[in-house]
Image: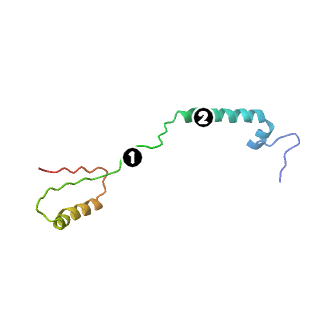
Amino acid sequence: MSQNAPGRHRSNISSFSIRRPIGTIMLTSVVLVLGGFFLSGLPLDLLPTIVYPQIRAGVNNSGVEPQVLEETVAKPLEAALARARWRRVRLASAG
């Protein structure tokens, strides 16, 4: 195991900080002040606007029973949309 010669200091960050406390305090102060300055310039939104994906479908068929409408329109539409991998879907109604 080698030892340092007398009068020589081992060069690492902890020994530097102990030997030069004023420099360490100044460097820490500069980092804190610059960090606070740049942190104050960051935009901060406590409640950001979140747009949730949604799909709306409307069917106007008077005289059709709700169960028939569910079986012929709603369930096939839900099944098709559940399988799809999409980011944007735009459905338009005719009529």
The local secondary structure at tag 2 comes to helix
- Depth check: 50 or 12 in front? 50
The image shows residue 49 at horizontal and vertical percentages of 40, 43
The image shows residue 25 at horizontal and vertical percentages of 73, 35
In this view of the protein, can residue 3 be seen by the observer?
yes
The image shows residue 44 at horizontal and vertical percentages of 49, 39
Q: Residue at x 74, y 33 (%)?
A: 23
Q: Residues within 10 Å of mark 2 (few under 14, many from 20)?
A: few
Picture layout, residue 78 above or below residue 5: below
Left or right: 46 in relation to 31: left
The mark that comes first in sequence, 2 or 1, is 2
Q: Residue at x 11, y 59 (%)?
A: 62
Picture layout, residue 20 above or below residue 62: above
- Depth check: 41 or 69 in front? 69
Left or right: 83 in relation to 32: left
Between tags 2 and 1, which lies in front?
1
In this view of the protein, can residue 12 be seen by the observer?
no
The amino acid sitting under disc 1 is: Ile
The image shows residue 93 at horizontal and vertical percentages of 16, 51
Residue furthest right in the image: 6
- Depth check: 91 or 19 in front? 91
Task: Name the disc covering residue 50, or none.
Answer: 1
CA–CA distance between discs 2 and 1?
Answer: 28 Å
The amino acid sitting under disc 2 is: Gly
The N terminus is located in which quarter? bottom right
- Depth check: 2 or 88 in front? 88
Q: Residue at x 61, y 32 (%)?
A: 34
Task: Name the disc covering residue 33, or none.
Answer: none
Q: Name the residue beneath numbered marker 2.
A: 36
Quadrant of res 59: bottom left
Left or right: 17 in relation to 37: right
